[in-house]
């Protein structure tokens, strides 16, 4: 079995304790995925597995066996992803450390919303989701930012959501 | 922080008060002030694209052959000694290369404590590092394990068995107050200030407030963990670190390990957030020593818990603020004193009274800070150390006084705006906080505030508005050096060891070099983050940008002479002296006959040179001793408080700033907002919980320490006066810390306006409102 990361197949690590995060960062030098807490509290390590957002620090590498992992490096492999461009446009970053996790989380979050998944602030659980500012803030609250780029991050995500809806 | 220093600073100030301003730096305003160029434009971050792509390399991301990994073990008692340490199981665990304890750690002197007079003194603690069996605080490093992989090191660290012999230690803030000491000075300011008879004025004032305010322990919590990758080759040391003090750290490591300064290179091109926390702590010494012991490159990335255990945060404080006022609301007495922690092995005085000295005019002042010693990890500088929490106390007190006087709180502040430094009498270099207040109030819709607290409701929610002022001193660090290189291909590079932590430092350096040299933005590059480059000061005190700017100005003044020398007799510039030319249009031009000009390309081509470089340092920062120089702010907050749960939701926040020239509105707005958001955390959610029985931090995780998340952060409006400061390079003052200054007061005052309840104890959690 193999783990497909950004289109390339890799063997799972021999040490069963290795997290997906440490596989990416320490073994494969895919250091775009960041580490902030190693306990699922900050979101810096967010990657996509089969298109859904997961915290790679809480995922053993072995759990990704046979699945498709997309990291920030894969997201922008064919030129800047619209979210990456929007983060630049809206200055949705300062130090840049939480940024890859924010972008990966946002990519999956847009798909979740388009699939009609409600959030804590969704008023009508059965209607299609419209991504308001509050919806984006709520859905992105698992990704911490300490520099305080929150406004720019939400603006960036909303601009991409609006483009996709148009 | 000595009495001698008070005398020196005091003497320099009084001497400078007699020196004509035009003789001092900034005596002639910087020619770039008011000129339309790249400065003032919204240039995008030059490192933005590699950051959104995940390609910016941080300290723990440098690949090296044979790299090994370390993990720290921390003490579980506050004070005492290690009675037994058994590392046998750890040493024989798979992959383990080395266990470092006080028994085998090489002799290393701890770095000297941070000092205003020695830029190479960068230590946050001067306790011995693994040098003996003694424990000084709960969480101190007592061992480190090095292994081939991180997993192996982490596991082996759990196998180390330690028995302690605990000693008596004071770990209670309240108990330690009786043994408080009084230090002579706070940074470069005198600690105790007594001006007029403030207690007497307070007692006879027709209106007064006199209250105690408490603020909590806090931690910086940059999302990037502290981490370094260290490699020795013979006696040469390379350290990839995440640090706010590249040059200082290189010097400190050279000293600690007994090697020449030029054999140490510290690289830190990107820092994943610092906020004062990314300085010199024990882990760098342990990692560098361990790398030398194992003879392999080594990475030590602290766990989040380790960061809490050995990297101190902001001290808790207890502050008294008393204000006396006459019938018109004019202050007759302003008293600010209190307690904060500074163990004898630490260096941060948490100067919460500094901002009070220049905030308002008053007939009398009495100001004094006392420092207590408890057995804790040494507290340190955290974004706007002092000012962030001092303004909570002061601005709450002003609001309480306004309420007693039945006067609008903005009006009360305007009535007490100083027109010169209220205590020293020094003239302000530029001060338009009154305009910041008026502009902010108008834009925020302050007139909609209900004067009577607890009267605006929407369902279960009570709505309130509050405001708070902020003041943060201008600091320019001495000794900043830069190298400016102009090349034959028409490009230029500015190099210095400066730090980019997300402030936009590198971006605004490029903008100013473009303007100084008359080059397009695209022709300018910057090299920073490397101790091999000319030494920039640390990133701290909101000082880095102006410190570098003064050095860039000095380099740009030196460059024309070099170019004229190279231009020779066949140049149209021949015969002109350096003072007679300007740099514009990608070259030099005669100031009086602009048609006489030549490009850098042409000059260097004729001279057959690839490039020309000058190295220069900024002038001594005498302007900050002659003038009162402060960034100021007026903060406005609207929030709602649930009657049912006590939950607070901040709906609107506005910061109105007077900080001199804003060099890049895009990155500046982000920096202001960032400070304001950290202020929301201070006001409402953040607290490092210290178990006062054991001195142990009980919530060393991002799950239990609550930094504001997206849902806590409203849309934040920021505006500024954009009036240049005629005394500073580029007309700029610091903007990194003023954003957090005044926010906690504005929030607390809005809570009072919403509920009628005055909370004087941060953070304002919902239990305090039920």
Image (cartoon, coloured by chain):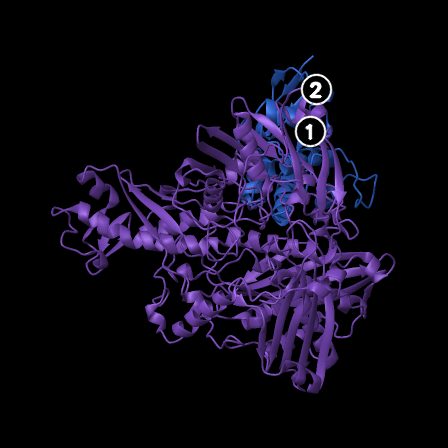
Chain colours: A blue, B purple
On screen, residue B425 versus residue B471, left or right, reads: left
Q: Chain of mark 2?
A: A
| Mark carried by residue B154 | 1
Q: Position of residue A54 (x, y in %)?
A: 71, 30
Local crowd at mark 1 within 10 Å, few (<14), some, or many (≥20)? many
In the picture, residue A159 is in which quadrant? Answer: top right
Q: Residue furthest top?
A: A1
Vertical placement of B89 versus B646: above or below?
above
Please report contact status of discs 2 and 1: CB closer than 8 Å, yes or no.
Answer: no
Quadrant of the image containing the C terminus of chain B: bottom right
Q: Position of residue B208 (x, y in %)?
A: 71, 80
Q: Helix, strand or loop at disc 2?
A: loop
Q: Residue furthest left?
A: B569
Q: As rendered, which of B372 and B339 lies closer to the eye?
A: B372
The residue shown at (60%, 81%) is B364
Q: Chain of mark 1?
A: B
Q: As rendered, which of A120 and B91 lies closer to the eye?
A: B91
On screen, residue B521 versus residue A93, left or right, reads: left
Q: As rendered, which of A141 and B2 lies closer to the eye?
A: B2
The residue shown at (50%, 35%) is B239
- What residue would you read off at disc 2? A67
Find the distance from the CA under tag 2 to the CA under tag 1.
28 Å
Vertical placement of B537 versus B158: above or below?
below
Q: Residue furthest right?
A: B644
Local crowd at mark 2 within 10 Å, few (<14), some, or many (≥20)? some
Vertical placement of B669 versus B66: above or below?
below
Q: Position of residue B270 (x, y in %)?
A: 52, 40
On screen, residue A52 versus residue B233, left or right, reads: right
């Amino acid at each position: 079995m193999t783990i497909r990361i950004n289109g390339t197949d890799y063997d799972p690590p021999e040490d069963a304790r290795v997290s997906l995060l440490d596989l990416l960062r320490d073994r494969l030098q895919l250091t775009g995925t960041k580490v902030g807490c190693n306990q699922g509290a900050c979101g810096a390590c967010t990657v996509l597995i089969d298109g859904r957002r997961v915290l790679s620090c809480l995922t053993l590498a072995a759990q990704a066996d046979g699945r498709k992992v997309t990291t920030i490096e894969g997201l922008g492999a064919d030129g800047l992803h619209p979210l990456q461009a929007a983060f630049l446009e809206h200055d949705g970053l300062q130090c840049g450390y939480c940024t890859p996790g924010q972008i990966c989380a946002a990519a999956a979050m847009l798909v979740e919303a388009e699939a009609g998944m409600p959030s804590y602030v969704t008023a009508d659980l059965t209607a299609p989701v419209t991504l308001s500012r509050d919806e984006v803030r709520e859905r992105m609250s698992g990704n911490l930012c300490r520099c305080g780029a929150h406004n720019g991050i939400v603006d960036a995500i909303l601009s991409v959501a609006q483009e996709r809806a148009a | 922080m000595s009495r001698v220093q008070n005398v020196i600073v005091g003497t320099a100030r009084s001497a400078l008060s007699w020196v004509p301003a035009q003789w001092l730096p900034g005596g002639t305003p910087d020619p770039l002030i008011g000129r339309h160029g790249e400065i003032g434009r919204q240039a995008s971050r030059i490192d933005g694209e590699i950051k959104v792509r995940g390609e910016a390399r941080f300290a723990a991301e440098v690949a090296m052959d044979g790299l090994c990994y370390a993990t720290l073990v921390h003490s579980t008692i506050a004070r005492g000694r290690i009675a037994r340490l058994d590392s046998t199981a750890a040493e024989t665990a798979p992959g383990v290369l080395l266990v470092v304890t006080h028994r085998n750690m090489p002799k290393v002197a701890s770095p000297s404590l941070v000092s205003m007079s020695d830029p190479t003194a960068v230590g946050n603690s001067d306790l011995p590092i693994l040098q003996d069996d003694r424990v000084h605080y709960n969480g101190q490093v007592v061992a480190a394990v090095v292994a081939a992989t991180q997993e192996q090191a982490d596991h082996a660290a759990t196998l180390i068995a330690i028995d302690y012999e605990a000693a008596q230690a004071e770990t209670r803030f309240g108990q330690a107050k009786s043994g408080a000491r009084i230090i002579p000075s706070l940074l470069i300011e005198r600690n105790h200030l007594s001006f007029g008879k403030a207690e007497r004025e307070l007692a006879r004032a027709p209106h007064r407030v006199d209250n105690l305010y408490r603020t909590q322990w806090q931690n910086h919590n940059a999302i990037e963990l502290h981490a370094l990758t260290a490699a020795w080759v013979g006696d040469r040391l390379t350290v990839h670190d995440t640090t706010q003090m590249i040059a200082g750290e290189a010097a400190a490591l050279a000293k600690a390990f007994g090697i020449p300064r030029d054999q140490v290179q510290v690289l830190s091109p990107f820092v994943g957030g610092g906020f004062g926390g990314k300085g010199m702590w024990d882990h760098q010494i342990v990692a560098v020593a361990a790398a030398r012991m194992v003879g392999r490159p080594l990475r030590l990335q602290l766990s989040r818990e380790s960061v809490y255990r050995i990297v101190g945060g902001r001290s808790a404080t207890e502050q008294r603020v008393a204000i006396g006022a006459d019938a018109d609301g004019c202050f007759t007495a302003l008293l600010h004193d209190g307690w904060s922690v500074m163990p004898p092995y630490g260096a941060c005085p948490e100067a919460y009274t500094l901002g009070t000295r220049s905030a308002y005019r008053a007939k009398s002042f009495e100001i004094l800070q006392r420092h207590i010693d408890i057995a804790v990890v040494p507290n340190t500088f955290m974004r706007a150390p002092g000012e962030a929490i001092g303004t909570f106390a002061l601005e709450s007190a002003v609001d309480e006084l306004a309420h007693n006087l039945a006067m609008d709180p903005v009006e009360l502040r305007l009535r007490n705006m100083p027109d010169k430094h209220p205590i020293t009498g020094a003239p302000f270099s530029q001060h338009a906080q009154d305009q910041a207040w008026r502009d902010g109030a108008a834009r925020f819709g302050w007139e909609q505030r209900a004067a009577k607290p607890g009267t605006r409701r929407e369902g279960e929610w009570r709505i309130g508005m509050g405001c708070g002022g902020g003041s943060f001193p201008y600091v320019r660090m001495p000794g900043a050096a830069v190298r400016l290189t102009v090349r034959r291909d028409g490009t230029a590079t500015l190099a210095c060891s400066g730090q980019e932590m997300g402030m936009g430092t590198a971006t605004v350096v490029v903008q100013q070099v473009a303007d100084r040299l008359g080059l397009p933005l695209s022709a300018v590059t910057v090299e920073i983050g490397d101790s091999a480059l000319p030494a920039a000061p640390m990133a701290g005190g909101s000082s880095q940008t102006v410190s570098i700017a003064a050095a860039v100005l000095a380099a740009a003044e030196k460059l024309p002479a070099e170019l004229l020398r190279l231009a020779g007799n066949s140049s149209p510039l021949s015969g002109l002296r350096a003072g007679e030319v300007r740099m514009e249009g990608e070259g030099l031009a005669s100031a009086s006959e602009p048609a006489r000009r030549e490009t850098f390309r042409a000059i260097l081509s004729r001279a057959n040179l690839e490039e020309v470089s000058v190295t220069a340092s900024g002038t001594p920062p005498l302007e900050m001793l002659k003038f009162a120089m402060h960034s100021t702010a007026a903060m406005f907050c609207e929030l709602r408080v649930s009657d049912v749960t006590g939950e607070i939701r901040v709906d609107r926040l506005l910061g109105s700033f007077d900080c001199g020239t804003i060099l890049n509105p895009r990155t500046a707005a982000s920096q202001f907002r960032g400070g304001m958001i950290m202020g929301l955390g201070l006001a409402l959610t953040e607290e490092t919980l210290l178990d006062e029985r054991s001195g142990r931090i009980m919530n060393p995780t991002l799950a239990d320490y609550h930094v504001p998340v997206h849902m806590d952060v409203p849309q934040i409006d920021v505006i500024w006066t954009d009036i240049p400061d005629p005394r500073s390079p580029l007309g700029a003052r610091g903007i990194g810390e003023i954003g957090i200054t005044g926010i906690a007061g504005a929030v607390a005052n809005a809570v009072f306006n919403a509920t009628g309840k005055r909370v004087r104890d941060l953070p304002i959690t919902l239990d305090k409102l039920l």
